[in-house]
Amino acid sequence: MSLFKILPGPVLLLLLCAWANYSCPYPDLAEILGNPQKFAGQRVAVFIEARIAERTEDGFILAQRGHRLRVLANVKEAPLGEFVAVQGVFQPPNHLRAETIRLAQGRRWKIAISVIPVLLLAVLLPMALRFDRRNGTLTLRAYTGVSKILQRKGNGN
């Protein structure tokens, strides 16, 4: 398989990741707090890497990438450090009157579990593929370590 046949896939994936990172369809906390008059009285949503930093008597403090915002809400049992998505009306200089709050329970486990397939691919792909420097191609190895193990089990050895 030629490198030029394989290369468009990872390049496209890299471009999609860059687009998702830099397109910013939603304002983040830094943008909201950096220009509070622009967002005054507007409905905003804060959800990317937003965590509950501390509880207050009238809600909680939301932290996102080093910025903090006071959220006015009737939530008493929100665990500290939990990922959360908050939608509400922004009130300058640093208050958000929450309309909807969603706790992302189990998000850390989801992230940890999603790392397992990535690690498996990182280990198994180099075992299954070989790069030919002369031709600049990737080829399947005739017998990978996994197929040798399966062959031994199939032969009764």
Image (cartoon, rainbow, N blue to C red):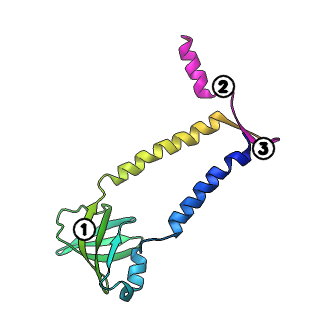
Instruction: Quarter of the image for the C terminus: give it.
Output: top right
User: As drawn, is 135 to the left or to the right of 119?
Assistant: right
Q: In terms of image quadrants, where is residue 127? A: top right
Distance between the alpha carbons at the discs numbered 3 and 1:
54 Å
Q: Earlier in the sequence, mark 1 or mark 2?
A: 1
Q: Which residue is mark 1?
A: 100
Q: Earlier in the sequence, mark 3 or mark 2?
A: 3
Q: In terms of image quadrants, where is residue 82? A: bottom left
Write the residue at 39% across / 65% down.
Answer: 48
Disc 1 secondary structure class: strand
In the displayed image of the protein, which residue is found farthest to the right?
Answer: 134
Badge 3 local density, few (<14 within 10 Å), some, or many (20+)? Answer: few
Q: Is 134 contained in the magenta span? A: yes
* Label 3–label 1 contact, CB within 8 A: no
Distance between the alpha carbons at the discs numbered 1 and 2:
55 Å
Q: Position of residue 37 (x, y in %)?
A: 36, 89
58 up-or-down from 12: above or below: below
Distance between the alpha carbons at the discs numbered 3 and 2:
21 Å
In the displayed image of the protein, which residue is found farthest to the bottom?
Answer: 37
Q: Is 136 contained in the magenta span? A: yes
Disc 2 secondary structure class: loop
Under mark 3, the amino acid is: Gly
Under mark 1, the amino acid is: Thr
Q: Which residue is mark 3?
A: 136
User: As drawn, is 57 to the left or to the right of 17?
Assistant: left
Q: Earlier in the sequence, mark 3 or mark 1?
A: 1
What mark, if any, has residue 143 been given in the picture?
2
Q: Nearer the viewer, mark 1 or mark 2?
A: 1
Write the start and end of the magenta stretch as one range: 133-156
In the displayed image of the protein, which residue is found farthest to the top?
Answer: 156
